[in-house]
Amino acid sequence: MLAYPSVITGDDVEFLRDDHAYVDVDGSRRMPLTQAIRIAGLVNYSMVNPVVLANAAWRGNLVHQATAILDKGFDLSEYEIPVECEPYVEAYQRFCREMQFVPDPAWIERPMIVELFGHRVGMTPDAVGTINGVPTVVEPKCTAAAHPSWGVQTAGQALGLRAAGLQIRDRLAVQLLKTGKYKLHPH
């Protein structure tokens, strides 16, 4: 039997974006943290119109791509941002400026597989960096309403990042609003 490390990152993890699945070094598929949260009953979008949900997913994916580009230190002017996404990206830029968030480019959208409570799960923390010198995991969200599952998601991410050797002390969901503003949800 193979002995697995408690954390697998980098080239040893393949994230299948279309399937939203993680594959580790031996080819085993691992459940994403967000799916585990959904199975636990902490997230349920069945009451949301599928067209609305698909549009929200499209917007969220594009905003996450834009924030990752910014967090890695690249210029967004080379990219075309859909008009519907611009206020959310502006809200994230405002958050970074006002909160003095300093992202760690090496840990932006970095897929990993982590053993949590005896189970191997995949996760991709959106942003890791510091706020006022404090190591923080940041989870941007493009929704009109806050959700209690965000705290569980950032807790899982923080555990995974700590297993990878990062000394995460704070967890924060940043609710990006279509007004170009943001709300903080510390956990």
Image (cartoon, rainbow, N blue to C red):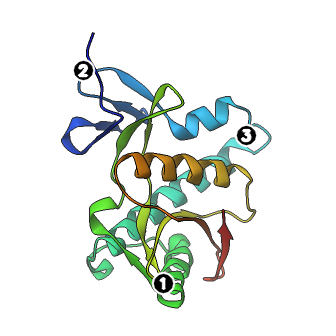
Secondary structure of the residue carrying tag 1 is loop
Secondary structure of the residue carrying tag 3 is loop
Image spot of residue 120 (x, y percent): 44, 28
Precedes in sequence: disc 3 or disc 1:
3
Q: Locate residue 20 relative to residue 185 in the image: left or right.
A: left
Precedes in sequence: disc 3 or disc 2:
2
* Residue that badge 1 annotates: 132
Q: Which amino acid does label 3 sit on?
A: Leu
Q: Locate residue 149 relative to residue 153 in the image: left or right.
A: right
Looking at the picture, tell me which residue is in the foreground, 167 or 45: 167
Quarter of the figure with residue 26: top left
Q: Locate residue 88 relative to residue 127 in the image: left or right.
A: right
User: What residue sits 69% from the left and 49% below the top?
Assistant: 149
Q: Is residue 175 above or below residue 9?
A: below
* Residue that badge 2 annotates: 26
Looking at the picture, tell me which residue is in the foreground, 171 or 124: 171
* Residue that badge 3 annotates: 42
Q: What residue type is labelled 2?
A: Asp
Extreme residue in the right direction: 47
Q: What residue type is labelled 1?
A: Asn
Secondary structure of the residue carrying tag 2 is loop
Estimate how packed mark 1 is, as few (under 14), some (14 to 19) or many (20 or more) residues with alpha carbons within 10 Å: few
Image spot of residue 187 (x, y percent): 66, 62
Precedes in sequence: disc 2 or disc 1:
2
User: What residue sits 73% from the left and 40% below the top?
Assistant: 42
Is any part of residue 124 visible from this angle?
no
